[in-house]
Image (cartoon, rainbow, N blue to C red):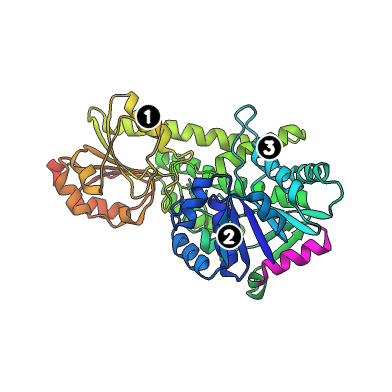
Amino acid sequence: MKISIIGSGYVGLVTGACLARADQNVTCLDIDEKKIQDLESGKIPIYEPGLEDLIKEKVENNLLSFSSNIDQTIKNADAIFIAVGTPTNIENDGADLSQVFACAEAIGKNIKSNTVVILKSTVPVGTCDKVEEIINLVNPSIDFDVVSNPEFLREGSAIFDFENPDRIIVGTKNKNSISTLNSIYKKHLDNNFPIIFTTRRSSELIKYASNSMLAMRIIFINEIADLCEKVGADVEDIALGIGLDKRIGPDFLNAGPGFGGSCFPKDARALVESGENYNAPQNLLKAVIDGNEKRKESLSKKIISITKDKKNIGVLGVTYKANTDDMREAPSLSIIPDLIDKGFNISIYDPQANKVGIKEFENVNWENDIYSVVKNSDCLVILTEWNEFKSMDLKKISDIMNKPIIIDFRNLFSLDEMEKLKIEYHSIGREAVNFNKETK
Ligand code: UDX
């Protein structure tokens, strides 16, 4: 079977590389010719652990190729994935589907009979119907089916997630498509990963509902963390205590600076918009979005109240989470400008952050390692949970800083450790450890 994937971004490339590893014949497409040239010469446009090597290997095995000739490649495809972006539409907070619809046009013009069109981009309920309409309008005589097959890939562990999914969701009732999807995911089925066939609309909604449920858990535990700080309880113990209840489960209960990235914020907004469109308000989710925004404001206030007259702040990690270079909707993008506005000097170290064109960070000082940041700082703020930060030399940091203060929004360290080292330590939902150099 020949598979084409339109959109060589994060989802398209991971899907393409992993399907090639499952012995499928895949061509990844993009209208961006420069990106395709880079990919052909082995340059990968994103940081995703393991992806570069996997792509190289599968290109060498002739199972994976790249092309910007979308029309020609579609003509030869038996299955076409659409994996283009669906960013927030700034006019209504819904999803901007222009790239998906442009794909549908191109597919309509070039598709051969009996091809399956698989929508992997995250789209509001009803979008597959619209894609079908567009293809039908452009090419009324062709026989095809549009299937929904959302992705559930976490940046940083996307290859693992693709190859070890909790479930594969496929929205179609068409027998030929069911058989095509079963053969695309044959390796997964052989390994007993569950594949759920449902309607297209249910499949589209499963994706939004999953991300929104996870986002809700994060805001819930963050609000519990705020209460813990007020009443002297420990959010880590609360997460453990509630997570052991099998009905709740332990995941996505890490309190932190709020959620960011290319999915949760955008998908939560789009589901609220769908709710408005169909007169089924998503009130819980509205509160989640609001809670996430307010959290960023409250964290800069917290930093300011701790640092008081000290003006040099070192920030460790600015991406929205560890193991990615992605800055989209990262909490740092609101927290750092707030601090700059209040007259703080900011130094940053991040192992991978994509620094290009981030207007929010115009006046910051980028350093190349943790300890260069420490040298210039009265206070360290940890925003992402990179392993490199978890294993940093706290004794060295304590020696370099005059009166060491660490504000840790990822709860990377134990309170005991900080007490022993006499580091003033403020984390999330736990008691503060208050010391300074004089008490050493
Ligand atoms: C998410 C979904 O997990 C994935 O299934 C979907 O397809 C794409 O969106 P991703 O955005 O890569 O993946 O990141 P994820 O690891 O889910 O984290 C999202 C955000 O929540 C990050 O900002 C992260 O720091 C935050 N988070 C996550 C918490 O604050 N606490 C947690 O316990 C988990």
SS under mark 1:
helix
- What residue sits right under mark 3 in the picture? 282
Q: Which residue is mark 1?
A: 337
Query: Answer yes or no: do the residues labelled 1 and 2 have beta carbons within 8 Å?
Result: no
Q: Is residue 283 above or below residue 155?
A: above
Indicate the position of residue 360 as horizontal and vertical percent values: 39, 31
Residue at disc 3, secondary structure? loop
Q: Nearer the viewer, mark 2 or mark 3?
A: 2
Q: Residue at x 68, y 41 (%)?
A: 102
First reached walking from the N terminus: tag 2 or tag 3? 2
The residue closer to the viewer here, 184 or 125, is: 184
- Element type where label 2 sits in the image: helix
Give the CA distance from mark 1 to mark 2: 38 Å
Pick out the residue farthest to the right.
141
Q: CA distance from mark 2 to mark 3?
A: 34 Å
Q: In the image, residue 120 lies at what x, y percent?
A: 65, 52
* Image quadrant in which you'd find residue 171: bottom right
Type of amino acid at the residue the image marks with label 2: Gly
Whether the magenta-drawn stretch holds residue 266 is answered as no
Residue 185: in magenta span:
yes
Closer-to-camera residue (148/146): 146
Report the side of 206 relative to 359 (left or right).
Answer: right
Query: How crowded is the residue under tag 3: few (<14 C-alpha within 10 Å), some, or many (20+)?
Result: some
Q: Which residue is mark 2?
A: 16
Viewer-nearest of labels 1 and 2?
A: 2
Residue 288 visible here: yes
